[in-house]
Image (cartoon, rainbow, N blue to C red):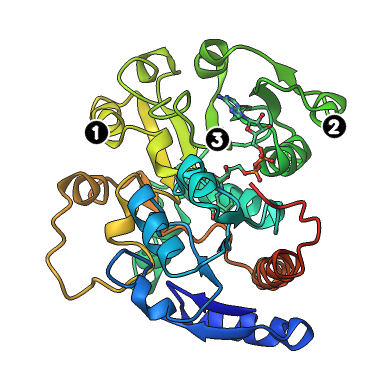
Amino acid sequence: MRVAVFSCKPYDRDSFTRANGVFGHELSFFDAALTAQTCSLAEDAEAVCVFVNDQIDAHLLRCLAGRGIKGVALRCAGFNNVDLAAAHEVGIQVVRVPAYSPHAVAEHAVALMLTLNRHTHRAFNRVREGNFALNGLLGFDMHGKTVGIIGTGRIGTVLTRIMTGFGCTVLAQDQVENAECKALGVRYVDRDALLAQSDIISLHCPLTDETRHLIDHRSIPLMKQGVMLINTGRGALVDAAAVTAGLKNGQIGALGLDVYEQEDALFFEDHSSEIIQDDVLERLLTFPNVLITAHQGFFTREALIMIADTTLGNLSQLEHHEFCANIL
Ligand code: NAI
């Protein structure tokens, strides 16, 4: 199949080129994001392949359909950036990679927790500058703390395993109670109870109308004073302005973000020589108890191999009109 791959980074080219040895698709790689302006790059392609911040709205889908594009292959799990109803209307099939490495994201959430707790990001800089003082680096034992996990799907389940291994009590909130989590001793509670009882809250549910800004001016006051909040789900699960207020008044004691609501204007690119215009993000970056990574939760060798294999396999199934389990 002729596939135009958008929002490409060197590591995408590497992993897709390597995996494509088995599939034999004709891949064209483009650095540009897929937009109504750049879709002409797809030329005679039959499908496009995109990433998390390509906004596949109704207008773009009509442009793609007009060019004869039959498929959109998301090389990610989340699909909140695609207007699925519009895709169905114009006859474009959308496929995704539902699971590539839940371990990658869960382990990154733990990295954020441990770094924020033990201040290793600050200790790294201090020691390199000859400052061996411990003031300001006081942490807490993870053992015995209560971790609240919102969304116990693939990633939430791996995180549950890790947290129970640390000796934490795990509370969860999900419409579907996961048998493995329950066997690990997880107690399902309603969201307000989870917010009220957790020392650490970690978000692992998809972004939907119901979960948008689930952390906001209403929910933050329900949390324990000094709670640690971790978001590796989707940026818009959190109202960043409300969280900033929570950090200023001490209700939120530490914040770890791998995703950010306005990330598509910044993430995955080098803006280090520019004046960044996003005042909310810039304010968040001034807090010593905030750690932001640029959507790298998925970024492990194992995950990249799985993403390329699954995406190219999905495209082969679309090409040959075979059953595809990853169609949306
Ligand atoms: P999953 O589909 O296996 O699990 C999601 C869970 O959330 C399900 O158990 C579902 O029932 C639950 N859920 C849905 N609505 C909910 C609600 N209103 N309240 C509580 N729970 C709710 O998905 P998976 O693979 O665990 O991924 C979770 C999310 O992580 C994805 O939707 C994606 O947004 C994000 N993600 C982030 C990555 C990163 O690099 N930072 C990489 C991969 C995924």
Secondary structure beneath dot 3 equals: strand
Q: Left or right: where does residue 322 sit relative to residue 198?
A: right
Q: Which residue is mark 1?
A: 241
Vertical order, 76 against 147 (above or below): below
In which image quadrant can residue 162 be found?
top right
Estimate the x, y position of residue 251 in percent, counting from the top left: 34, 23
Residue type pointed to by label 1? Ala
Vertical order, 116 against 253 (above or below): below
Secondary structure beneath dot 1 equals: helix
- Sequence-first tag of 2 and 3: 2
- Sequence-first tag of 3 and 1: 3
Secondary structure beneath dot 2 equals: helix
Q: Is residue 133 visible?
A: no
Pointer 2 and pointer 1: residues touching (CB < 8 Å)? no
- Toward the right, the furthest residue is 183
Q: Which residue sits at x=37%, y=29%? A: 252
Q: Which residue sits at x=20%, y=51%? A: 282
Real-space CA distance between mark 2 and mark 3, rounded to the nearest whole angstrom: 18 Å
Q: Nearer the viewer, residue 305 or 217?
A: 305
Q: Nearer the viewer, residue 307 or 177?
A: 307
Q: Which residue is mark 2?
A: 180
Q: Which residue is mark 3?
A: 202
Real-space CA distance between mark 3 and mark 1, rounded to the nearest whole angstrom: 18 Å
Q: Is mark 1 within 8 Å of ligand 1?
A: no
* Of marks 2 and 3, the one in the foreground: 2
Real-space CA distance between mark 2 and mark 1, rounded to the nearest whole angstrom: 36 Å
Vertical order, 319 against 264 (above or below): below
Give me the disc on residue 69: none
Q: Identify the image quadrant of the N terminus.
A: bottom right
Q: Which residue sits at x=66%, y=23%? A: 172
Estimate the x, y position of residue 236 in percent, counting from the top left: 38, 38
- Sequence-first tag of 2 and 1: 2
